[in-house]
Amino acid sequence: KNEVEQSPQNLTAQEGEFITINCSYSVGISALHWLQQHPGGGIVSLFMLSSGKKKHGRLIATINIQEKHSSLHITASHPRDSAVYICAPYFGNEKLTFGTGTRLTIIP
Amino acid sequence: DSGVTQTPKHLITATGQRVTLRCSPRSGDLSVYWYQQSLDQGLQFLIQYYNGEERAKGNILERFSAQQFPDLHSELNLSSLELGDSALYFCASAKDQGGNEYTDTQYFGPGTRLTVL
């Protein structure tokens, strides 16, 4: 069974803190997506990665294929980063599987 | 703005009814994906179309069906609606050229919030 675990489920931090959200999955994958869901419900695709590391602004995503683990980092966090972050590995069975999400709250 | 449009934004209907949700992908994107997000199940993949053909099926009920038209817009039809069908329904599009699904960035529409009373 293809399983995805995200941690933490909820995270509250002060503005400016470095944030790490983790995603572990059970079997080998072809690719992994990180999504951001805003409080209003809209979903934005942040990264798609199959190896290594990607950076976009203050966001960094890494993946370790051997360890079946990916992390999403946010540097210099800001209240507008408050959202639910969802990892979605592609296990190669023609469908994305979604994690339960990490609810991030950044306090000014 | 992702470039993906979904209509309607909100839909309220009664049990037993049938509704149609519409999605227009970004210009040039060949794939359309449909997802359901409910409070108890989270995000779930329903179905994917690529250039008019069904490509992959996920947890889609038999009461639900979809199609992608020649202009690449897609419709998701939900029939015999039940209370448990109340959810946010998202579509996403991607280029997926060469058939490499899920290795291209997906662009999500704003979603249709369906409420079944």
Image (tube, coloured by chain):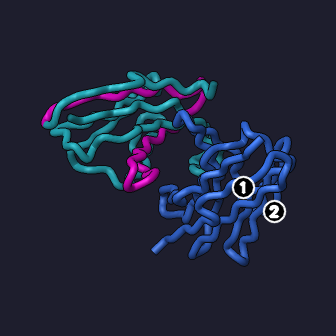
Chain colours: A blue, B cyan
Residue that badge 2 annotates: A52
Residue that badge 1 annotates: A49
Disc 2 is placed on an element classified as strand
Residue B116 in the image: x percent, y percent?
Answer: 24, 35
Residue B30 seen = no
Say few, some or many: other residues with alpha carbon within 10 Å of mark 2 (under 14 / 14 to 19 / 20 or more): few
Specify start and end residues of the magenta stretch as a single range. B16-45
- Is residue B17 rendered to the left or right of residue B20? left
In which quadrant will I find the C terminus of chain B?
Answer: top left
Residue B94 in the image: x percent, y percent?
Answer: 59, 38
Q: At 60% from the left edge and 48% from the top edge, which residue is drawn?
A: A84
Quarter where residue A24 is shown: bottom right
**Nearest the eye: A83 or B43:** A83
Q: What residue type is labelled 1?
A: Leu
Q: Which amino acid does label 2 sit on?
A: Gly
Q: At 48% from the left edge and 63% from the top edge, which residue is drawn?
A: A93
